Amino acid sequence: MVVGEVAEAVDLLVVGGGPGGYAAALHAARLGRRVTLVERGELGGTCLNVGCIPSKALIEVADAMAAPERVAPWGVAATTDLDMSAVQAHLGAVVERLTGGVRHLLDRAGVVVLAGEARFIKPNRVVVEHGATVEHLDFRHAIVATGSRPVELAEVPLDGARVVGSADLLSSDTLPEELVLVGGGYVGVELGCAFAKLGSRVTIVEAEGSILPGFEDRITRTVTRGLRNLGVGICCNTTAVGIDDAGLVVSGPSGSATLPTDRVAVVVGRRPNSDLIGLTEAGATLDGSGLIVVDAARRATDTVFAIGDLTAGPALAHKATAEAEVAADVACGHANAFDPTCIPLIVFSDPQVMVVGMSEGEASSAGIAVTSSRFPLSASGRAATLGAGDGFVTVTADGEGTVIGVQAVGAHVAELAGEAALAVETAATVEDIAGTIHAHPTLGEAIAEAAMGLAERPLHAG
């Protein structure tokens, strides 16, 4: 059925049902708005369905597969066997439980969920297409959270079988014998660690001079060592230029070469979905990268707000969720602005990476007088019990002793991000952290130990 041009009036429209979109819908409903949410795919978006959640669940499976080698020195003899069909069933169950929870929350909040693809055609109107059905909605306010999609390479086109994106790689019930990952950012590194543990022979191809471009050298060196220990090949300063029957053709410092592979995963980054929704028809402005220009309130026009991967900043679910509350508040008449001191960055590699706030190098480049203290996890009691002493925690402070950054690499350091972000956001001092009793034996002690080093009273490190 095709519905004509007569538009239905809606109060607050949310376009996109990922972490930013459903969070915005829930916040606005809590504030008393009548909310309609349009989602073209599955609720939960990329993160819950084909990104963050299934990838981290697969990483846990991979860690279990690698456990026998890790625990053998402890006197534990174990073997593992992999059933990828059962693994996929497990990942699906995890995703379904979480997306089902999102559906329940939206239902309980009274949010009307429409299936379909929305496109702006006027400053206050969208057309929603779902199969043969076309609806027009006039809105008072709209919050747009349509996210991003993977960047594709013309030289290595996806075919859904031999050359895939991360989503297809994660959903496959067959394990590649030879896997080449094109892209050595956090997605490539995470998947490289996981598939190496599952049993694939993995090579990472990265155009920059090191994996994890943009992270400080000490972190990338530690992660590189971890990848090498897993048998992962790393080809930096190398680009993919084609694919043939023999494998992936690359060009690097030594010229052209062919990497044998039965599967290539292209994971070189993401691009905003701003070009799919006609936001310029609503009066929004896009920058040269296709990102929607917004103010601190996430306002793209007087009545349209944009959040998440559509806007500048790291393409992270927790950034989108935080921006959602700001946009919903302002749309509902409450003053708010998105002005975080830090946005935590996590890499679920082996070892893991956690970066919050500024590093010493970044602060120095910004003209800030800084000091830092690095506590090695080789001196951590908890890391010793885990059998994972490689890595460190660094606390960086300004000249007045205010903590402006925490960086860590090591087993399970992702779980330190909350404390680190709280310290930076609340302008905690080195003495605040050093003087806070941390439970023993925990990894959190490493933050306190690094702070003690800055306070010139180190305990377990010289």
Image (cartoon, rainbow, N blue to C red):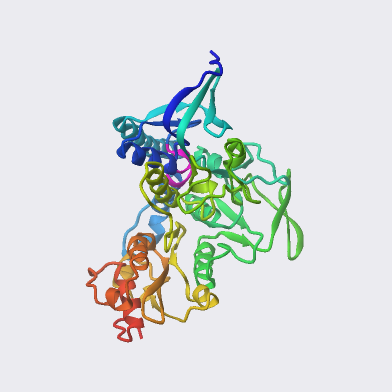
Q: Residue furthest top?
A: 1
Q: Which of 290 and 328 is in front in this view?
A: 328
Image quarter hosting the C terminus: bottom left
Q: Give left or right: position of 31 versus 117.
A: left
Q: Which residue is drawn at 24% across and 70% down?
A: 438
Q: Nearer the viewer, residue 397 or 28?
A: 28
- Above or below, comparing residue 78 to residue 216 in the picture: above
Residue 261 colored in magenta in the image: no
Q: Give the range drawn in magenta.
A: 44-53
Q: Which residue is drawn at 24% across and 77% down?
A: 435
Q: Residue at x 58, y 38 (%)?
A: 279
Percent position (x, y) of residue 207?
66, 60
Q: Nearer the viewer, residue 355 or 3?
A: 3
Percent position (x, y) of residue 330?
40, 46
Percent position (x, y) of residue 210?
60, 65
Q: Give left or right: position of 122 versus 140.
A: right
- Above or below, comparing residue 117 to residue 360 in the picture: above
Q: Residue at x 64, y 40 (%)?
A: 162
**Image quadrant in which you'd find residue 78:** bottom left
